[in-house]
Amino acid sequence: MKKHSGMRPQDVVILLKIAAKGKQAWLMKDLAVELGISSSEVSESLNRSVFAGLIGADKQTLMKSNLLDFLEYALKYVYPQKPGAMVRGMATAHSAAPLNKLIQSQEHYVWPFGHGDLRGQAIEPLHPSVPQACLKDKMLHELLALSDALRVGKSREQKLAMAELKTRIC
């Protein structure tokens, strides 16, 4: 096994994709195609996640409690983000479901994406393939948007996002 040199942003994307699949069976190659990430990178990511205790040694079983702890306490520090320039993109954080039903705001956050339908402040996604992958998977979009609310949101948004993540992942 390679030396563990820390988690990478795409590791969170891959773990949340697995969470979005729920009890549905999956293969590494399926994750690679659906996320637009190479099969070798998915394999290396799963190895890092096993080492970090976020997925079981079988590389199939999410350690849900550990993942939720990582998202709640580490995500905003390990992969911080500040809203950027106004761009066209895909809604994220409080601008996307499910938080957009709970939080009313004139300020929108988006992942820069040419096929997006909303103008807002740019939030760099955890991986460049995120917007395209989220077009195909509504649950993944919700999980990643909630994760972005943890990265850029204020205290209230973070609490709401964490509550929503707990209901979706557990």
Image: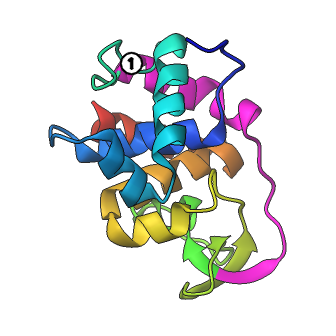
**Magenta-highlighted residues:** 63-88
Q: Residue at x 70, y 37 (%)?
A: 76
Q: Is residue 7 above or below residue 100?
A: above
Q: Count residues near mark 1 (Cα–Cα under 10 Å), then give few for <14, some for 14-19, many for 20+.
A: few
Q: Position of residue 114 (x, y in %)?
A: 62, 86
Q: Give SS at disc 1.
A: helix
* Left or right: 51 in relation to 23: right
What x and y, as percent, mark residue 65? 39, 18
| Nearest to the observer: residue 63 or residue 38 | 38
Q: Is residue 34 left or right of residue 54?
A: left
Horizontal arrangement in the rendering, residue 90 relative to residue 138 (left or right) = right
Q: Quadrant of the C terminus?
A: top left
Q: Is residue 142 visible?
A: no
| Residue 79 visible at all | yes
Q: Label 1 belongs to which residue?
A: 65
**Residue 15 location, quadrant:** top left
Q: Position of residue 30 (x, y in %)?
A: 30, 50
| Image quadrant where one finds the N terminus | top right
